[in-house]
């Protein structure tokens, strides 16, 4: 005979089970695990009912993208844990290890520094920069120096703080020590590091630039240095030249002559011209460029590069500053045939080069008029010479008259070409020039 209590319990379960299944059905629809505590207590005695109340997540719900995201997050977590362990180990080896361990640490720091800017800042906070700088100067093995330079290059990438820490660690002050000890390939790697550090010149951070300048000039004067590395050195020198305080040190190092020698090099000419354009803004830089006899010829030669408009514009810009209020410089340029070249640039050059060329043509035209003076029209003196008897001074007077006629013809031709080039009517006005000879007074 069945117990009445058991029978009552079974009846109760039969009445409860449809309600519980209904709750489970709605829970599946709304994506929630709906399991009231009252049902949980009763479901503990019934596994089938338990499954109906708290169903497991179907495998179809977890799509491949979700699986990939979970796997990626796990891998990232493992990678971060590995990076943290590697960072601690590298810092310890760099401070307390031997040269072999320091080399391994530098290699690991290079790898970690490539991750992101946050990692580079973290490494700097752990104090890895000073021992790396010391390793660069104290290591007897070129391989260790090579690893130290590479690690410093990665640490300096995109962070002014790390660059400043390298300068404070004595990298620039100790730079002359490497001039004789570092091998040629190491010097090329060092040039890459210096171009990154030289960006500090655009800030107010104090920097001993004289040591960098001497290193750069030596690299630029070395014939074995490839063009790509010379461009890197020019980029470093350009950053330094943007600060007026460095002009004297750059000029004193003989940079003007070195830059002039690089002008015929089409790959390096733009960088050299840009540096000269910065140097000429100061009185000492302008004087150094004026005193170099190679400068006018090299600049005039660069003006013929119509396939390199930027070089052409920079060359004319420097020539404008040299020729402005300097009759001697204009005479040198005229002797090199700059007038005909300016006419060509005024017609075929870039818009900026055309404006600068036309302005210089105006100067030469005005100078020609001042030479002709009162002899710009038909002269009675020349007419009287034909009727007067020949004298000893007549040939000289005839030559002078012919020269005056040639100058007048040249002036007329220039006016015609300038009109053809659509020059504005007020272009010939020189009122826009200030009294100062600084390049800031130049309109272009």
Image (cartoon, rainbow, N blue to C red):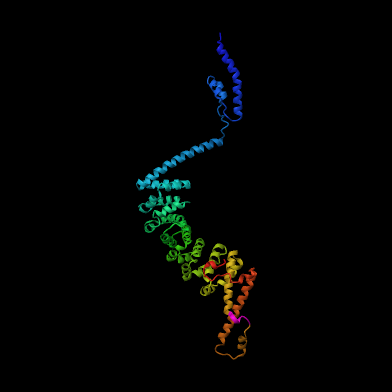
Up-down relation of residue 285 to residue 44 (above or below): below
Is 210 magenta? The answer is: no
Main secondary structure type of the part rendered in magenta: helix
Q: For residue 42, what is the image quadrant?
A: top right
- The answer to which of 254 and 363 lies nearer the viewer is 363
- Residue 12 seen in the current view: yes
Question: Residue 324, position in %: x, y?
Answer: 53, 71
Q: Which residue is outermost to the top?
A: 1
Q: For residue 311, what is the image quadrant?
A: bottom right
- The answer to which of 123 and 106 lies nearer the viewer is 123
Up-down relation of residue 266 to residue 408 (above or below): above
Question: Residue 344, position in %: x, y?
Answer: 59, 69
- Residue 302 seen in the current view: no
Q: Which image quarter holds the C terminus?
A: bottom right
Is 373 magenta? The answer is: yes
Question: Residue 220, position in %: x, y?
Answer: 45, 61
How many marks do you count on the picture?
A: 0
Q: Which residue is outermost to the bottom?
A: 389
Residue at (47%, 39%) from the top-left corner?
A: 77
> Which residues make up the magenta segment?
372-377
Q: Which residue is outermost to the front?
A: 38
Residue at (48%, 70%) from the top-left corner?
A: 290
Residue 272 placement, left or right of 361: left
Question: Residue 188, position in %: x, y?
Answer: 43, 56
Q: Which image quarter holds the N terminus?
A: top right
Up-down relation of residue 123 to residue 239 (above or below): above
């Amino acid at each position: 005979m069945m117990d009445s209590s058991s029978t009552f319990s079974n009846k109760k379960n039969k009445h409860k089970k449809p309600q519980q299944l209904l709750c489970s059905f709605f829970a599946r629809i709304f994506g929630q695990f709906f399991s009231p505590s009252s049902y949980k207590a009763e479901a503990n005695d019934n596994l089938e009912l338990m499954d109906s109340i708290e169903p497991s997540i179907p495998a179809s719900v977890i799509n491949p993208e979700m699986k990939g995201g979970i796997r990626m997050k796990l891998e990232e977590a493992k990678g971060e844990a590995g990076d943290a362990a590697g960072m601690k180990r590298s810092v310890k080896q760099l401070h307390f290890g031997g040269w072999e361990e320091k080399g391994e640490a530098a290699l690991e720091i290079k790898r970690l520094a490539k991750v992101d800017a946050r990692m580079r800042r973290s490494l700097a906070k752990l104090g890895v920069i000073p021992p790396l700088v010391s390793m660069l100067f104290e290591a007897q093995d070129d391989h260790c120096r090579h690893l130290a330079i590479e690690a410093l290059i990665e640490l300096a990438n995109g962070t002014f703080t790390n660059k400043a820490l390298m300068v404070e660690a004595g990298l620039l002050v100790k730079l002359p020590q490497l001039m004789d000890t570092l091998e040629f390939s190491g010097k090329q790697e060092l040039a890459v590091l210096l171009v990154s550090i030289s960006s500090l010149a655009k800030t107010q951070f104090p920097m001993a630039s004289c040591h960098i300048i001497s290193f750069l000039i030596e690299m630029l004067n070395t014939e074995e240095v490839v063009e790509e590395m010379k461009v890197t050195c020019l980029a470093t020198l350009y950053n330094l030249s943007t600060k007026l305080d460095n002009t004297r040190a750059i000029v004193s190092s003989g940079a003007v002559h070195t830059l002039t020698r690089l002008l015929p090099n089409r790959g390096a000419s733009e960088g050299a011209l840009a540096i000269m354009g910065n140097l000429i803004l100061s009185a000492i830089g302008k004087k150094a460029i004026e005193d170099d006899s190679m400068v006018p010829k090299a600049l005039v030669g660069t003006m013929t590069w119509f396939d390199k408009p930027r070089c052409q514009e920079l060359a004319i810009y420097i020539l404008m500053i040299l020729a402005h209020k300097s009759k001697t410089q204009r005479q040198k340029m005229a002797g090199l045939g700059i007038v005909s070249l300016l006419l060509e640039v005024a017609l075929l050059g870039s818009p900026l080069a055309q404006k600068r060329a036309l302005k210089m043509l105006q100067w030469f035209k005005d100078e020609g008029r001042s030479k002709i003076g009162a002899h710009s029209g038909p002269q009675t003196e020349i007419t009287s010479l034909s009727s007067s008897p020949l004298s000893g001074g007549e040939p000289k007077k005839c030559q002078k008259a012919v020269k005056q006629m040639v100058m007048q013809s040249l002036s007329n031709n220039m006016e015609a070409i300038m009109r053809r080039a659509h020059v504005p009517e007020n272009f010939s006005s020189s009122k826009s020039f200030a009294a100062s000879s600084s390049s800031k007074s130049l309109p272009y």
